[in-house]
Image (tube, grey):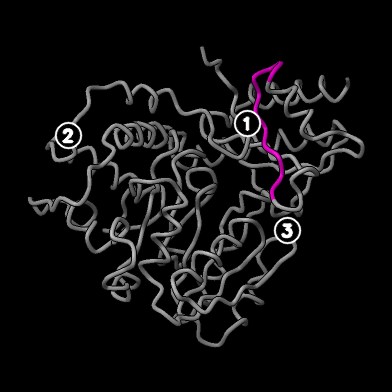
């Protein structure tokens, strides 16, 4: 029998009970009118958490990495200049995906743990087709200023990774000038992994690749089934949607919006502040730059002489607590502790701090 884990790593997080309960509801077909109603309501709620009015806002039938792929494969024409702000693993991944789509990639490298330097990114090329950045870098626990990029992007499209930020911290796609954005369900949305909340505005859609290399992620074709197809009375079959996962996302979003989106942001902030203060009280040093730390995902330096993997193993085996290792060059020297979605609450803070104190004391 699988034991219940306290998922305090970089994701997935423990889902909201409402999202889990929805998975046990009777299964619907992907063209059932009742399911289409659920899908349309889900898209409308996603507009709220994205902070957008984009008609083409939908849950892609894949995880957040497919959201990244969809963003680039639908907007990058061969030879397009794509400026990517790289301040962690997922910025690096953006450069790889963009290059595979035929882009001329201009990577603006930053020290890991630091936010994106907006001026350096904007001056990296005089006329890029796309500027891409990660809002909440999951590998480092750093928040970057997307609004500042959007305010000065010029004619470029602004493409944003919001996988760890959506429903956890302030996100206002329209106000900030975000043209294309993708996320994942498994973090602050409090739903199991499996869907990629996605949004693209008219400006970006008009510039899209008419026939992208990915059939499955072709937004032009997907639009006949979901997104702009809503309310038109006729759906064009594209693929069999994961109906139970969409129902689960619907339930999770309903839970979030009933609490109130700004209240959810505040709850994540309070949990993150308490965790970071408690870690410092234990004598631990935080990794991400002060003033730019994510509340929902805290990065902390592994103390000198401590075996990172052994601590994580003991937390898991003794207390059923999962925390994450660092990424890249920091795999053994940083821990990533996430309090996301349902886990952004005071009892989770106390649990992880008490367990860490106990294990490190040994």
Q: Residues within 10 Å of mark 3 (few under 14, many from 20)?
A: many
Give, as a single range, the part of the protein colored magenta: 317-327
Please state which of residues 73 and 40 is positioned toward the viewer in this rendering.
Answer: 73
Residue placed farthest to the left in the image? 233
Structural distance between the alpha carbons of marks 2 and 1: 34 Å
> What SS does tag 1 mark?
loop
Q: Residue at x 74, y 51 (%)?
A: 288
Residue bearing mark 1:
8
Q: In which quarter of the view is residue 55 placed?
A: bottom left
Residue placed farthest to the top in the image? 1
Q: Residue at x 54, y 63 (%)?
A: 94
Residue 112: which disc?
Answer: 3
Q: Is residue 193 left or right of residue 223?
A: right
Residue 29: which disc?
Answer: 2
Q: Is residue 255 left or right of residue 141?
A: left
Where does residue 148 sit, x and y in percent of width and height? 57, 69
> What SS does tag 3 mark?
loop
Where does residue 18 sit, x and y in percent of width and height? 38, 25
């Amino acid at each position: 029998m699988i034991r219940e884990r306290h998922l305090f790593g970089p994701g997935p997080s423990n889902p909201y009970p409402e999202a889990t309960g929805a998975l046990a509801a009777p299964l619907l077909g992907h063209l059932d009118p009742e399911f289409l109603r659920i899908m349309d309501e889900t898209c409308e709620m996603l507009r709220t958490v994205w902070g957008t009015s984009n008609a083409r806002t939908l849950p892609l039938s894949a995880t957040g990495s497919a959201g990244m792929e969809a963003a680039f494969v639908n907007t990058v024409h061969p030879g397009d200049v794509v400026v990517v702000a790289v301040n962690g693993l997922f910025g690096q991944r953006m450069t790889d995906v963009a290059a595979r789509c035929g882009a001329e990639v201009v990577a603006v490298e930053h020290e890991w743990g630091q936010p994106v330097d907006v001026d350096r990114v904007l001056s990296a090329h005089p006329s890029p087709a796309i500027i891409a950045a990660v809002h909440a870098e999951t590998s480092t626990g750093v928040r970057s200023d997307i609004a500042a990029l959007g305010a000065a992007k010029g004619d470029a499209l602004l493409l944003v990774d919001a996988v760890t930020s959506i429903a956890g911290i302030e996100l206002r796609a329209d106000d900030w000038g975000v043209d294309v954005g993708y996320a994942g369900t498994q973090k602050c949305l409090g739903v199991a992994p499996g869907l990629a909340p996605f949004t693209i505005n008219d400006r970006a859609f008009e510039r899209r690749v008419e026939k992208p290399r990915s059939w499955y992620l072709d937004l032009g074709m997907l639009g006949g089934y979901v997104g702009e197809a809503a309310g038109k009375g006729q759906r064009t079959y594209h693929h069999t949607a994961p109906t139970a996962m969409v129902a689960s996302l619907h339930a999770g979003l309903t839970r979030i919006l009933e609490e109130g989106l700004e209240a959810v942001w505040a709850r994540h902030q309070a949990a993150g502040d308490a965790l970071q203060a408690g870690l410092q009280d234990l004598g631990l040093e935080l990794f991400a730059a002060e003033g730019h730390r994510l509340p929902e995902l805290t990065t902390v330096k592994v103390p000198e002489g401590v075996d990172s993997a052994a601590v994580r193993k003991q937390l898991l085996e003794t207390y059923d607590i999962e925390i994450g290792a660092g990424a890249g060059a920091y795999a053994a020297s940083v821990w990533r502790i996430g309090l996301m979605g349902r886990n952004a609450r005071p009892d989770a803070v106390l649990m992880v701090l008490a367990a860490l104190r106990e294990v490190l004391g040994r």
